[in-house]
Image (spheres, rainbow, N blue to C red):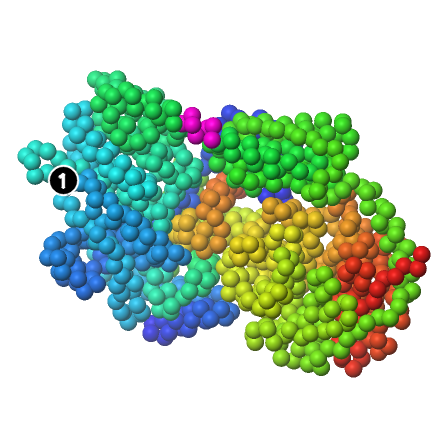
Amino acid sequence: MKKGRGDATNLLSELADGRETEASELFTIIYDDLRRRAHAYMRRERPGHTLQTTALVNEAYVKLIRQSSLDWESRSHFFRIAAKTMEHILIDYARKRNRVKGPGAHQIIPLHLALGEALVLSPDLSADYLDLGRSLERLSKLDPLQGEIVRLRLFTGRTIEEVADVLGISVESVKTKWELAKAWLYGDLKRRHERST
Amino acid sequence: MSVRPEDWKIVEALFEMALHLDPKEVPAFLAKNCPDPRLRAEVERLLTDRQLAPKDFLEHPIWVDAGLGLESRRPRFRSGQRLANRFEVTRFIGAGGMGEVYEANDLSLGEHVAIKVIREHLLWQRGVVERFKQEVKVAKQVTHPNVCRIHEYFEDSREHSEGTEEILFLSMELLRGRTLADRLKEGGFLTVNQAWPLVKQMASALDAIHAIGVVHRDLKPGNIMLVRAKELGSVRAVVMDFGIARRATTSADKQPMTTRGEVLGTPEYMSPEQREGQLATAASDIYALGLVIREMVTGMRPLESGTLASTESRPGLPARWEAVIRRSLERDPSRRFKTAEDVARALAGEGSALSTSVRRARGITIQLRHVLASVALLALVGTIVYMFFRNSHSNVSDASIAVAMQARFNQDPVLFKDTVDITVESGVVTLRGTVGSEGERAAAENIAKGCYGVKSVLDKLIVRTQTGGGPETIMKPKGTKAGGHQKESTSATNLTDVTSPRSSVLPPSWISLDVMEAAGNAVYVGGRSADGGTLGVYQTRNGKFSDLSHLLPASWCPVRSLAFGDDQLFVGGGSRGGCAALFSPASQVLQDLSSELHSHGPGLYYYGGIQALGFNGREFLVGGAGKVTSLETYAPTTGRFTYLSMPYFAVNSITSYGNSFLLAGAGPGSGPSQPPALGWISPDHLFTNLTSFLPPGWGVTAHSAQDGKEFLIEGRNRATGEKLFAVFDPANRSSTDVTESFPESFDLHSVDGRQGYFLLGGQADGVCYLARYHPGAQPSVVRGLLPPDAIDVTAVKTVGNQSIVAGLTRARRVFIISFPEKTSK
């Protein structure tokens, strides 16, 4: 783990220097870091307690960023990569889960990645991450900025204000785009489900 | 079936406007403003889907556990730990969205205080710390018995193996008691007699906060602490958490849950205007106070929709209380009580408070109208001017109104063949365009009135018609330029009939001269040398050349674009990330602006720096190709860059035209199959996608120029990669492929066309190629003027009656010459 941390620091200082960073490397590091933290928490907490994952993930980001004094530009870059990373983690997770059904399937990723209420389309219809990933891809083609807003909101838990800050656009325009993106994604997911059932 | 990316902006604009309408008005609004049935269906479908989606659809970060989420985070500090070498933590009180609250012993004063530590990740937002300090400074001024005293803010940090943890906290009065929320939950609602002394204190607290110009913006039972007062049986109500940090980091946003039961921004108690994203005012606090009073005496929680609906009054609630609650909850902020004290006085039965509010509200309306009227006069230029007054309560952005209107007008091929220029400023929408006849004028007016249709968005329309072109008409009706055109084309055929070209020798270190920009008789040139970027100025009058390269920062390479405006020269270039600078010929000072680029974050100008620049009389447009759309404006008056958010566009060329810009470049992708992109930026930064007007089969476009009427655009065949040329006529929105007019091997390096024809320079068949081109005719090749060993033309410019041409000789020497365009007839 020591080595992993060192790598993160290097990559982050490269970000700070404005050098190109392979997103996939950072991906691995964020992923490992989240997993390590999740393990640590699981050991510490009494059984039956559930992680407050928002807090957990935020803390992971805090520590990653703390390691190197990232300026605002680099932080903003960092969050965009982190959003992409989380998306990959979730979609990979969903893929693997679809493949390995049965006991132990949930062990693949120790984070508690439950569907939550986020993807409930109606009382008896839920989408999964793969569906969402596909729809998000389509939305990004239509409007890359909206795709980015959704990723930052959903996968890094940024608030509307933080998203506006990361993307350098106004809070008002994030709000409108967010409303529109949600409506579009909802419609797209729902229609796809209706077609497939 | 699905919407095309180029229409998405229109869909978005209509969607945004519709969000702010009464649902009943939406069909009429769309019918009037969106004649395209396909787009209308899309907007309608999105609005329906928005209604159908569960309330919290996608509202939680994706990894939130299903409905569990017990707060297991440990407090950041344990008892006994010291902060800022002064406060010893004695107890963790609780956590909220903004941070954690502890009880601590202030060792220097020897008393117990409360400290609130701001969550570390909130400090990452730009300016948060500064704003937070400012807020504390203001809040400290409130010394009211019913407002929680804010003492001071502190900064501290502690080292970990992983790095430095930043700690920002404030100390405040420690209140021992329970919140009004707890009281209501445990003991049920209050009688009017129990509520009255608390309301009176809360009202007095709110007025004290408002008196220093601060809005609480989050008044709710959870923020009111009930403290047992010294006198037996009486309770002190203390308002907590005002303004602080909330303004700095959050606003009227529906935030996700942070810890169980705690929602940032507390939408329940939000006023309708905050909910719609407008700034909270003192009137918003009055609204919240109304909700709190109602909850105190009826137990009724704020409705989800945020409106009072019918006040299901509690039996036995005095009519006066009911009336006061209703007035506090007026949707229109100007109809609410003016001050919290007015609320208390009305509850006490002093009727005068009501009429005061109404009188004041009227005064504001009159004032507003006055302001709008003066704007209207200023805007009265151009041929036909429509002014729409946006409803003052409407929250639709100016840009959306303009996009929607532009879309509406663009869909009418008969009217406004020339570009309709729509500007929206502070709610006044001004439309300028040229119409050919009285009939067209009447028809245009009808469309304009149709757009205006919906009251909640726009509530006033003024139409002024002037005959004759006004000074700001962007494009004159067809034909007005014909005279000039004829003359120029004659001169084009006589191009070789020139006398005495002037030339100049450039420093031997210059490797290439790639860009030129005219400023009066001076022509600024840029390129690269062995040492980096180059900048110079060439005087057309005497052929004198001065090298200014020493002014450029050492890291600059190369200079790729120049634009002159506002008596200054904007210099763009660089490689990854781009460089920008502003040069003032008057002071001979070059100011490096590179660090101020990227108002949108990293990834801008990633591929090849700043490729293109333009100036529209007011601001510079800065463009390039990046990981995201790389397009910013730079206003010399404010010295600020503003990012233009739009679908992905790699900008290769900017051509200013009137006070607008034509962009040529590429859409997302790479390699030969990368799609072309062509677009228009209006003076108010609206983007119109014109890509569909390019001839079929086109890929990436590179150069463009305008001759006062049309644009010449260079592009590439998407399949074969060979060069293509087209003339784009903005008035008719049509383009003609003119590739056939040029030699097959022609590589265009530079084109300029301000004088009614195009001067093109480049290379063909291994030798330099310089020609004047008049659309519709064959290009006339210029011979005998360039140095005999010239092999390439790298930059051309026309200034007044002079043409300036730079290029390379076989010996790789950079030359620059100018020649007058003397017409023989």
Residue B465: x, y in percent? 69, 31
In the displayed structure, does residue B295 sit left or right of residue B18?
left
Depth check, front residue: A7 or A104: A7
Residue B302: x, y in percent? 31, 31
In the displayed structure, does residue B552 sit left or right of residue B299?
right
Q: Main secondary structure of the magenta part?
A: helix
Compared to residue B180, the image places residue B638 above or below, namely below
Question: Residue drawn at (61%, 29%), measured in percent from left and top?
Answer: B462
In the displayed structure, does residue B6 sit left or right of residue B228?
right
Compared to residue B370, the image places residue B725 above or below, namely below
Q: Which residues are magenta?
A: B361-367
- The quarter holding residue B555 reads bottom right
For the C terminus of chain B, which image quadrant?
A: bottom right
**SS label for mark 1:** strand
Compared to residue B519, the image places residue B433 above or below, namely above
Residue B612: x, y in percent? 65, 61
Question: Residue drawn at (91%, 55%), measured in percent from left and top?
Answer: B490
In the displayed structure, does residue B779 sit left or right of residue B628?
right
For the N terminus of chain B, which image quadrant?
A: top right
Q: Furthest-right residue in view?
A: B825
- The quarter holding residue B452 reads top right
Q: Is residue B484 visible?
A: yes
- What type is the residue that disc 1 sits on? Val
Q: Chain of mark 1?
A: B
Question: Residue drawn at (81%, 60%), measured in percent from left and top?
Answer: B801
Q: Furthest-left residue in view?
A: B232
Quickly name the residue at label 1.
B227
Q: Is residue B500 magenta?
A: no
Residue B30: x, y in percent? 59, 30
Depth check, front residue: A43 or B15: B15
